[in-house]
Amino acid sequence: MTSFCNLFKRHSFSVLSHNMWQWLFL
């Protein structure tokens, strides 16, 4: 369960940072 939570957190952080970079360079 903890690993799944960790993976989900990492995935959401990755998506968030990707969106942030996209917004910065738009």
Image (cartoon, helix red, strand yellow):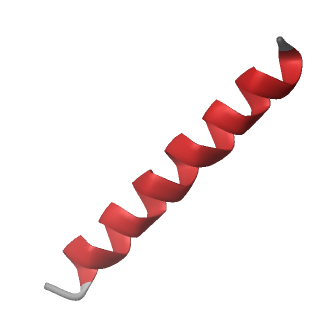
In the image, taking residue 6 as reference, residue 26 lies left or right, namely: left
- Closer to the camera, 8 or 22? 8
x and y, in percent, of residue 1 in the image: 83, 11
Query: Residue 3: where, in percent of width, then height?
Result: 85, 26
- Asked if 11 appears above or below 19 in the picture, the reply is above
| Residue, far top | 1
In the image, residue 1 above or below residue 9? above
Image mark count:
0
Residue found at the very far bottom of the displayed protein: 25
Where 4 sits versus 26, above or below? above
Q: Which residue is drawn at 26% across and 76% down?
A: 22
- The x, y position of residue 7, in whole percent, is 72, 37
Q: Left or right: where does residue 19 sit relative to residue 12?
A: left
At 62% from the left and 32% from the top, the residue drawn is: 8
Q: Give left or right: position of 4 versus 11.
A: right
Q: In this view, does 10 lie to the left or right of 18?
A: right
Quadrant of the image occupied by residue 25? bottom left
Quadrant in which the C terminus is drawn: bottom left
Q: Residue at x 86, y 17 (%)?
A: 2
Quadrant of residue 19 within the rendered picture: bottom left
Q: In this view, does 11 lie above or below 23?
A: above
Furthest residue toward left: 26
Q: Nearer the viewer, residue 20 or 10?
A: 10
